[in-house]
Amino acid sequence: MSVDPDLVRLLKRLKLGPLLPTLPERLTLARAQQLDYVAFLTLLLADEVQRRDQQALERHLLQAGFEDRVTLDGFDWASPVQLDRRQLQQVFTLEFLQRKEHVLFVGPVGVGKTLLAQCLGSASVRAGHSVLFIRADALLAELGQARADRSYDKVFRRYLAPDLVILDDFGLRR
């Protein structure tokens, strides 16, 4: 089914052009189910809201600066590293954010601290929180440079703005 060119122009003018790929399918569905105008419009707008929400999520995950896209769903609980699963699941409720508490993952190199931190950050973004993931050496270098060029306050505020700041590899040098 083709879409009226005037409708295409109007949708693009209203910045609703992304509706166009699914519009013929939605028109066919509306006719088949005899949807009234309000139900059809609701269906179209729900598609657009879902698309924009997904786009925003992707943008926020990118802005957070994660090295990898990971979730706790893919975590290998059978690994030889001993973790308190119940305690870890409690952390992933994200209640610590409301209580303004800190979370610290400690252990030797290679046990999955970075993976867990990125999983926690990803879960936080998906829950609507702002997150910044940065290596400690990069943070310290940036703060040192900011102090030298007198932009310290501005740079420091950027690190205070997110709901969650994840400092990785705090004890390592690069």
Image: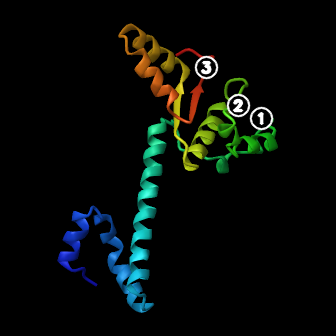
Give the vertical position of 144 relative to 104 (above or below). above
Where disc 3 sits, the SS reads loop
Left or right: 93 with respect to 166?
right
Indicate the position of residue 45 as horizontal and vertical percent values: 40, 70
State the separation of the CA atoms marked 2 and 3: 15 Å
Residue type (three-letter) at the residue carrying disc 2: Val
Residue drawn at (52%, 27%), measured in percent from left and top?
A: 160
The residue pinned by badge 2 equals 111
Residue type (three-letter) at the residue carrying disc 1: Val
Q: Earlier in the sequence, mark 1 or mark 2?
A: 1
Q: Earlier in the sequence, mark 3 or mark 1?
A: 1
Indicate the position of residue 101 as horizontal and vertical percent values: 69, 31
Residue drawn at (52%, 17%), measured in percent from left and top?
A: 137
- The numbered mark at residue 132 is none
Nearer to us: label 3 or label 1? 3
Residues at circles 1 and 2 in contact by the CB criterion of under 8 Å: yes
State the separation of the CA atoms marked 3 and 1: 20 Å
Query: Could you tell me how many numbered marks the image carries?
Result: 3
Residue drawn at (46%, 57%), measured in percent from left and top?
A: 53
State the separation of the CA atoms marked 1 and 2: 6 Å
- Is residue 70 in view? no
The residue pinned by badge 3 equals 170
Residue type (three-letter) at the residue carrying disc 3: Phe
Nearer to us: label 2 or label 3? 3
Please state, as top left, top right, bottom left or bottom right, where the N terminus lies in the image.
Answer: bottom left
The residue pinned by badge 1 equals 81
Q: Earlier in the sequence, mark 2 or mark 3?
A: 2
Badge 2 local density, few (<14 within 10 Å), some, or many (20+)?
some
Give the vertical position of 19 relative to 134 (above or below). below
